[in-house]
C-alpha cells in the first residue's frame, strides 16, 4: 500500500517514533480491530516488519522508499491450485519508518496499520489496486 501524500510527510517533526516492541504492540491492537472474517485468513499469512522497503520492493510496486506502507508477498488465494506446492507462506510486510512518518499519535498509527493490513489482505484475496480503491482500501 502506498500513502497518497507521501511527500507531504517527509521530515515532519510530529512523526511518531516507537521502539520495535511498542510497534509490535500497536500491530497487535490493529489486528484485534480487523473484522472477524479477515482474521480467519491471517493464520496462514506471516506479518513482518521492516524499517524501509529495499530497491527491489520499490521497483516492484513503482513506489518511492518513503511512500510504501505495506507489501503483500505470496500467491493470492484465487491463483492457488491444490496441485501447487507452496514453498513460502504468504507474507505481509509493514514498513515501520514510513508508517511512523505519517502518524502523529498512537490511535492514528493503529488505524493506519489496520487500513494497510486490510489493503494487503485484499491482495491475498486476489484483489488488485483498482479493486481495493473501489472498496475503499486504496
Image (cartoon, helix red, strand yellow):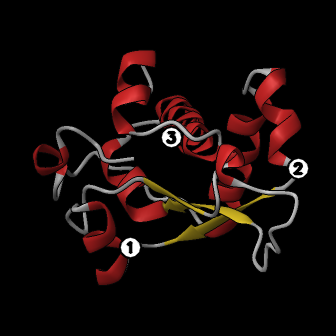
Label whose residue precedes the other's in the sequence (1 or 2): 2
- Name the residue tied to disc 3: 116
What crowding class fits label 3: few (fewer than 14 Cα within 10 Å), some (14-19), or many (20 or more)?
many
Q: Are marks 1 and 2 in contact (CB under 8 Å)?
A: no
In the rendered image of this protein, does residue 73 appear above or below residue 114?
below
In the rendered image of this protein, does residue 37 appear above or below residue 15?
above
The image quadrant that residue 3 belongs to is top left
Label whose residue precedes the other's in the sequence (3 or 2): 2
Numbered label tally: 3
Is 45 situated left or right of 117 in this image? right
* Residue most extreme to the left: 8
Residue 63 or 13: which is nearer the viewer?
63
Q: Quadrant of the C terminus?
A: top left
- Name the residue tied to disc 2: 43
- Name the residue tied to disc 1: 53
In the rendered image of this protein, does residue 113 appear above or below residue 48?
above
What crowding class fits label 1: few (fewer than 14 Cα within 10 Å), some (14-19), or many (20 or more)?
many
Q: Position of residue 51 (x, y in %)?
A: 46, 73
Q: Are marks 3 and 2 in contact (CB under 8 Å)?
A: no
Q: Position of residue 120 (x, y in %)?
A: 55, 45
> Residue at the location (45% across, 17% down)?
135
Foreground mark, 1 or 2, reads 2
Amino acid at each position: 500500500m502506498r500513502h497518497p501524500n507521501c511527500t507531504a510527510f517527509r521530515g515532519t517533526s510530529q512523526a511518531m517514533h516507537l521502539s520495535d516492541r511498542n510497534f509490535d504492540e500497536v500491530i497487535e491492537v490493529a489486528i484485534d480491530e480487523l473484522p472477524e472474517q479477515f482474521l480467519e485468513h491471517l493464520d496462514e499469512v506471516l506479518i513482518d516488519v521492516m524499517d524501509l522497503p529495499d530497491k527491489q520492493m520499490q521497483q516492484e510496486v513503482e513506489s518511492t522508499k518513503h511512500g510504501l506502507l505495506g507489501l503483500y508477498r505470496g500467491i493470492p488465494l484465487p491463483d492457488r491450485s491444490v496441485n501447487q506446492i507452496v514453498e513460502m507462506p504468504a507474507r505481509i510486510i509493514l514498513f515501520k519508518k514510513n508508517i511512523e512518518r505519517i502518524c502523529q499519535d498512537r490511535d492514528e498509527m493503529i488505524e493506519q496499520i489496520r487500513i494497510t493490513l486490510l489493503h494487503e489482505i485484499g491482495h491475498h484475496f486476489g484483489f488488485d489496486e483498482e479493486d481495493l480503491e473501489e472498496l475503499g482500501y486504496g
